Image (cartoon, rainbow, N blue to C red):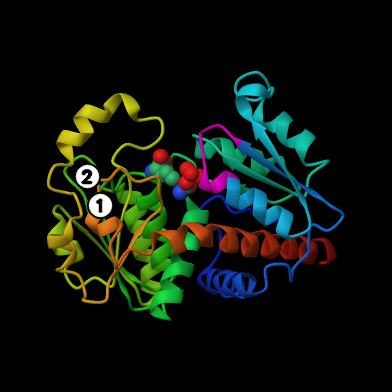
């Protein structure tokens, strides 16, 4: 069966470690893997805006010997005009992989159900699993390990990044501590899923109502925008609701002395994080942004190999 990557736990802990290891190798030797030589085409579909994801997947597909095809759903037959299933049936006959940034997780599942090539979630309302691979790679580079590290996420803990951090960091054996204001806590089902994974990897999951408890002694501190794509109408209310959740240098000073700071970007300085933290010495956000390229290349190579294994078994 073809493998897809729609959410962080579509791969197991060993597979996650293998992809991160290969991402670090690809960073050293960017043109050493050529699974898309031909060139084969990879469809990159965008229902939401993007800078990093569009660039890193386009460059990544080219580096792997292929041709990236960016499809803007606004100017295609997708988005209510033609069904996801029919779109999948057309694409799957012509492209090597399908990468889709969209709203609904159910849409991604429908695409995967009708595709005989790997489908990758490049951000949905529920998950951003490619970002977490890049983030874990960045932590591995700076801390030389993942399992056992204390990972703090502060902010909107009900969004795609929080869900993916909970699941992805638990898979990596980290101690994940999340802090969010009332009304923005993670879904109980996600916390339970992450906790069940952590129980098998030696990690743990805790949810707090204020940032200090989550950040104290953390090795890695992360945040994300308070207003995700599609939530723009709630901006004024959210800015009020998240008061006290800005990561500033006072909060950061309560983390481990050698803690690193992550943000998937785009960032809104003065809201979820102050400029002195995100632009300061503990911030590794530019490594993190670059690592999208390497991590996604490793993922695409791995998915391609898995498809070949399944064809021959
Ligand atoms: N972090 C991230 O996914 O960035 P873009 O929205 O620019 O792709
Ligand atoms: N939570 C953010 C992530 C952006 C990469 C959003 O969905 O807009």
At numbered mark 1, what does the secondary structure look like: helix, strand or loop? helix
Determine whether the beta carbon of the residue marked 1 sits less than 8 angstroms from the nearest atom of ligand 1: no
Q: Quadrant of residue 33?
A: bottom right
- The quarter of the picture where the C terminus appears is bottom right
Q: Residue at x 63, y 37 (%)?
A: 45
Q: Residue at x 12, y 61 (%)?
A: 250
Q: Residue 40 placed where, x, y %?
A: 82, 50
Q: Secondary structure at mark 2?
A: loop
Screen quadrant of the N terminus = bottom right
At label 1, counting other C-alpha atoms closer than 10 Å, the crowd grade (few under 14, some 14-19, many 20 or more) is some
Image position, residue 7 (x, y; %): 51, 52
Image coordinates for residue 299, horizontal then vertical, percent: 62, 61
Which quadrant of the figure has residue 308?
bottom right
**Can residue 1 be seen by looking at this rendering?**
no
The disc, 1 or 2, on the residue closer to the chain's N-terminal end is: 2
Left or right: 170 in relation to 235: right
Would you say the residues marked 1 and 2 are in contact, meaning their CB atoms lie under 8 Å apart?
A: yes
Of residues 313 and 231, the one drawn nearer to the viewer in this rendering? 231
Q: Is residue 172 above or below residue 110?
A: below
- Residue 275 image label: 1
Give the residue pinned by disc 2: 270
Q: Label 1 vs label 2: CA separation? A: 7 Å
In this view of the protein, which residue sits in the foreground, 134 or 178?
Answer: 134
Q: Is 246 or 77 nearer to us in this picture? A: 246
Rendering coords of residue 43 (x, y %): 71, 42
Q: Is residue 186 visible?
A: yes
In magenta, the rendered stretch is 46-54
Please say if 249 is above or below 54: below
């Amino acid at each position: 069966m073809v493998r897809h990557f729609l959410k962080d736990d579509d791969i197991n802990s060993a597979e996650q470690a293998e992809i991160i290891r290969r991402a670090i190798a690809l960073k050293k030797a960017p043109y050493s893997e050529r699974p898309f030589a031909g060139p084969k085409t990879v469809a990159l579909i965008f229902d939401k805006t993007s800078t990093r994801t569009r660039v890193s997947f386009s460059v990544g597909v080219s580096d792997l010997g292929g041709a990236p095809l960016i499809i803007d759903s606004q100017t295609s037959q997708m988005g209510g005009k033609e069904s996801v299933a029919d779109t999948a049936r057309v694409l799957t006959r012509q492209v090597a992989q399908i990468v889709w940034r969209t709203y609904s997780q159910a849409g991604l599942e429908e695409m995967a159900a009708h595709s005989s090539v790997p489908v990758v979630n490049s951000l949905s309302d529920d998950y951003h699993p490619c970002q977490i691979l890049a983030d874990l790679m960045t932590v591995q580079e700076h801390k030389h390990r993942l399992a056992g590290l204390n990972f703090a996420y502060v902010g909107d803990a009900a969004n795609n990044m929080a869900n993916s951090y909970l699941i992805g960091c638990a898979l990596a054996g980290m101690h994940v501590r999340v802090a969010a204001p009332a009304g923005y806590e993670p879904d109980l089902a996600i916390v339970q899923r992450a906790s069940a994974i952590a129980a098998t990897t030696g990690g743990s999951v805790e949810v707090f109502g204020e940032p200090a408890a989550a950040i104290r002694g953390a090795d890695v501190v992360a945040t994300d925008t308070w207003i995700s794509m599609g939530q723009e109408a709630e901006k004024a209310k959210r800015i009020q609701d998240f008061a006290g959740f800005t990561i500033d240098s006072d909060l950061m000073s309560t983390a481990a002395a050698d803690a690193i700071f992550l943000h998937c970007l785009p960032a809104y300085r003065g809201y979820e994080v102050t400029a002195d933290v995100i632009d300061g010495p503990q911030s590794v956000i530019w490594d993190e942004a670059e690592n999208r390229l390497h991590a996604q290349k490793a993922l695409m190579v791995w998915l391609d190999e898995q498809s070949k294994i399944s064809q021959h078994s």
